[in-house]
Image (cartoon, rainbow, N blue to C red):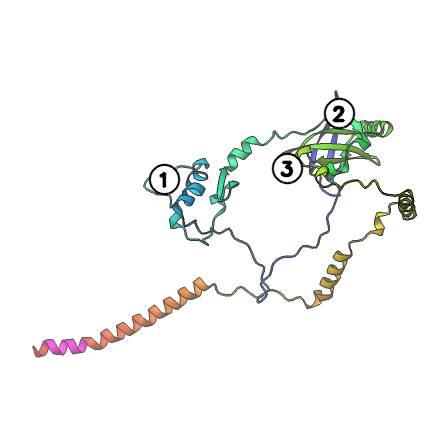
Amino acid sequence: MAQAIWTGTISFGLVSVPVRLYPAVRRKDVRFHELDRLTGQRLHHQRVRSPLPEEPSARGASVEQVVWPLVTEPPAEAGTRRPSASTLPAGSTVSAEEVVRGFEVAPNRYVAVDRAELEALEPERTRTIDIEQFVEVDAVDPLYFEASYYAVPGRDHARSFGLLVQAMQRTKRMALGWIVLRRKRHLAALRPQGNLLLLTTMLFADEIVPRAELEPPVHPDLTAKEKEMAALLVNTLTGPFEPERYRDEYREQVLALIQGRAASARPAEPSPTSPAVADLMAALRASVERARKERSKATKLKPAARRKRKSA
């Protein structure tokens, strides 16, 4: 059995029912890694600096005035100076400690928010699903539904859990409440699903695009015969929903392609010597050869110098 992603209680009124949440969906997308075509080695992405704007005014507006004054950083050690932006070359790697979150408020102008500031705004982590109200099952448009989880009763609490499920089934109601998952407070719906409850996080009203912006105009000139034939076609194609009839044929074809090549898969070639190390070795070798030549030359010059002193 999969590991529960959350444990807590469903709370409504003075009743609390311990539950565990498990993912209700297991996505089966085919995921690929990026490989070097020549060596077969896996590629990794790095954070690199972009070139600074050439205009001093633009640089000051986008960097100095907007971003850096809003970032809380530890004071520099005594006797050290923090590098200026102009001394950091474009394309240089940026470490995780040097990354801050920025929200673009205008082209090339960002408001920076420190991670500690965001953490201070996070909701308090609770272990309770607080039910605010019950509504009819058909009252909520499925457009609001997001991610779903199975709510399973805690040990020795199957009776109280079953009572809640049956009460919701009998009244044809669903519950709306709040839950904190992954540092975010979600509006959630609880609906009976067999002998379990299905918890589905929901979108907020301002996240739904108003359909009035997209709805076409109504055509009043549709004839009764056209409407009748359209309804007949719909009824002819009507049948029970059988989800196993519908398959992801693209995923199946991709997996078949991969399976057909699995026997010929080759391991990635060992990492070659990096250019920096290779250049260093070449420089060291050349330095050794140069030192040997200079030593040999000096050795040959010493007898000649002694002869000159004796003759003098």
Q: If the image is split into quadrants, where does the C terminus sit?
A: bottom left
Q: 29 above or below 170? A: below
Boundaries of the magenta span? 302-309
Using the image as rendered, state which of residue 148 and residue 112 is in the foreground. Answer: 112
Q: Choose between 43 and 136: the one closer to the eye.
A: 136
From this view, report whether residue 31 is shown above or below residue 25: below
The residue wearing badge 1 is 77
The quadrant of the rendering that contains the N terminus is top right
Who comes first in sequence, dot 2 or dot 3? 2
- The residue lying furthest to the front in this view is 221
- The numbered dot on residue 20 is none
Which residue shows up at 63% across the image and 57% down it? 33
Residue 207 at x, y percent in the picture: 67, 36
Q: Marks 2/3: CA distance?
A: 24 Å
Q: Residue at label 2? A: 133
Label 2 SS: strand
Closer to the N terminus: mark 1 or mark 2?
1
> Looking at the image, is 88 positioned above or below residue 165?
below
**Of the residues shown, which amino acid type is indicated by label 1?**
Glu
Residue 298: percent from the left, percent from the top? 23, 73
Magenta span contains residue 132: no
Residue under numbered circle 3: 182
